[in-house]
Image (tube, rainbow, N blue to C red):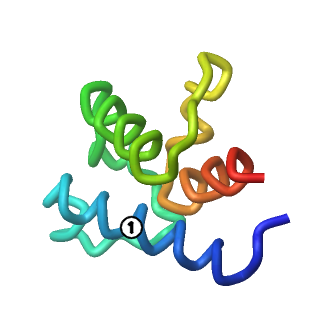
Amino acid sequence: MPSVQQTTQAESLVRDFIFQKFPLARQRDVSNDDSLLEGGLIDSLGLLDVVMFLESQFEITLEDDDMVSDHFDSIASISRLVEERLT
């Protein structure tokens, strides 16, 4: 199980990336639990950017089974996916 420090760090890095890459997220000041997909903040091409960031930043490999909307719906869900892959 990841430590609280890892969890906080992963969520912080994901949040920073989302806010930097997708200005609308910053403009709306989305919370970690707000839907990025339903809110139209990230589209399919944006998801590719998120996947590339996660694999590069956290040195993880995401499989086809990981590519479901539940894993990418919010900053919190993306962070949980990272934490699962790091364990």
The residue lying at 69 percent from left, 45 percent from top is 85
Closer-to-camera residue (10/24): 10
Using the rendered view, name the quadrant where residue 26 is placed: bottom left
> For this rendering, which residue is in front, 26 or 2?
2
Residue 77 vertical placement versus 66 (above, below): below
> Closest to the observer: 27 or 76?
76
Q: Is residue 75 above or below residue 51?
A: below
Q: At which x and y percent is residue 87?
A: 78, 53
- Residue 11 in the image, given as x and y percentages of width and height: 52, 69
Q: Residue furthest right?
A: 1
**Quadrant showing the N terminus:** bottom right
At 23% across and 69% down in the image, what residue appears?
Answer: 28
Residue 36 placed where, x, y %?
A: 39, 50
Indicate the amino acid at tag 1.
Arg
Q: Tell me: residue 62, above or below residue 31.
A: above
The residue that appears at 65% across and 83% down in the rendered structure is 5
Say which quarter of the image contains residue 67.
top right
- Residue positioned 29% across, 37% down in the render: 49
Q: Secondary structure at mark 1?
A: helix
Which one is nearer the viewer's eye here, 77 or 1?
Answer: 1
Name, please, the residue furthest toward the front. Answer: 59
For disc 1, the marked residue is 15
- Whether residue 10 sits left or right of residue 5 in the image: it is left
Q: Quadrant of residue 13?
A: bottom left
Which residue is at the far top? 64
**Left or right of residue 54, residue 46 in this image:** left
42 to the left or right of 20:
right
